[in-house]
Amino acid sequence: MTAEKHTDRNAESRTETRTETNAGTRTGTNAGTSDVKNILAIVSPHVGGRTAGAALAGVFPEQAHVTVVETADEDPAALRDAQIIITGLGPVTAEHLATARHLELVQCASHGFEYVDLDAARGRGIPVCNIGSSGAEKQNVAEQTFALMLALAKQLVPAHTALVEADWALPRLQQSITELSGKTLGIIGLGHIGAEVARRAVAFDMNIVYTGPKSAGPETEARLGGARRLDLDELLRTSDYITLHAPLTEQTRNLLDAERLALLKPTAFVINTARGALIDQDALADALASGTLAGAGIDVFDPEPPTAALRLLKAPNVVLSPHVAGVTRETLVRIALAAVQNVLDHLAGKPLRDIVS
């Protein structure tokens, strides 16, 4: 398998990565005229772009002709001929789906799938899959969740900032430093990632409550230290820490709005390592500025990257990270392999996993 860069005849300043297996016989093959499948890999620049895409493409066997782009619009011919789209946070719109007239599958290389027009895919009978059951991201997202919780509980950011400025801030910070042990952790979404967070919370002697569309069942609840299922509003009133692990849908967009944020204790902390649009970011900034919320640890934003106008960037008592949960070296390999395996199963005529639409 080889990877080579070439210049588009219609846009000489733009380069793309084409991975061609058996390149001597594949060049010029059209969709539908060969057993070789045309795969369009869309990898957004902020998650690695062409470099990450080339590594992803290298996993495919000889029956795949992979074109790597950073946006679906970048190569109209590759989009038109694509039989499979595999996308790493690259938007796939209704227009893209209509253009890809031979399309059989859209595979998201992520847990999230909000960047694909599900209604349009459903209308054409094209399955959309994520990597939900793979658990590829669960370890690192759970670790990042606890990194943010601990940074807030121990006031690590203001402590570090003060100390490097020769300010022994212990007397000032001592009143706000707290423990995780004995606190109640409210988990919004007890799926693969939420359960991994809960498992770690047990080790920290935290009390666990959760909300979601269905009960985790008595055995799982017992393993998680006697976790209890509550409705969302009661969970918000009860919890000392609230962590979000729900998918972004029209029903969950702005799930934590101003009204719901007002239900939280003034000593509570909010953690979001899922999707930025699950929280009304302005309402969260207001709560932090007014002191009605103790702090927030945020790894995801809407949009990404955030603009300079995002008020959370200047809000008090926040710890921010640039969507690093789920992007360790180890995690990226697991994500790629999970997405590719589902595509390979499709090529082999096996049932698809994790169909979201």
Image (spheres, rainbow, N blue to C red):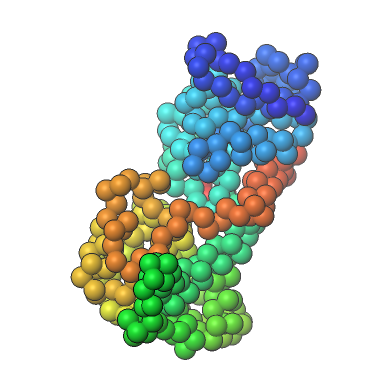
Q: Position of residue 290 (x, y in %)?
A: 20, 70
Relative to 318, residue 345 above or below: above
Residue 262 horizontal side relative to residue 29, left or right: left
- Which residue is found at the position 58% from the left and 16% from the top? 7
Relative to 291, residue 38 above or below: above
Relative to 213, residue 234 above or below: below
Residue farthest toward the top in the current orientation of the protein: 9
- Which residue is found at the position 23% from the left and 67% from the top? 289
Q: Position of residue 55 (x, y in %)?
A: 67, 38
Residue 294 horizontal side relative to residue 201, left or right: left
Residue 80 visible at all: no
Q: Position of residue 80 (x, y in %)?
A: 54, 22
Residue 175 horizontal side relative to residue 356, left or right: left
- Which residue is found at the position 42% from the left and 28% from the top? 95
Q: Position of residue 277 (x, y in %)?
A: 36, 54
Residue farthest toward the front in the current orientation of the protein: 166
Location of residue 3 (image quadrant): top right
Relative to 140, residue 9 above or below: above
- Which residue is found at the position 51% from the left and 69% from the top? 147
Image quarter where the N terminus lies is top right
Location of residue 126 (image quadrant): top right
**Residue 318 versus residue 122: which sits nearer the camera?**
318
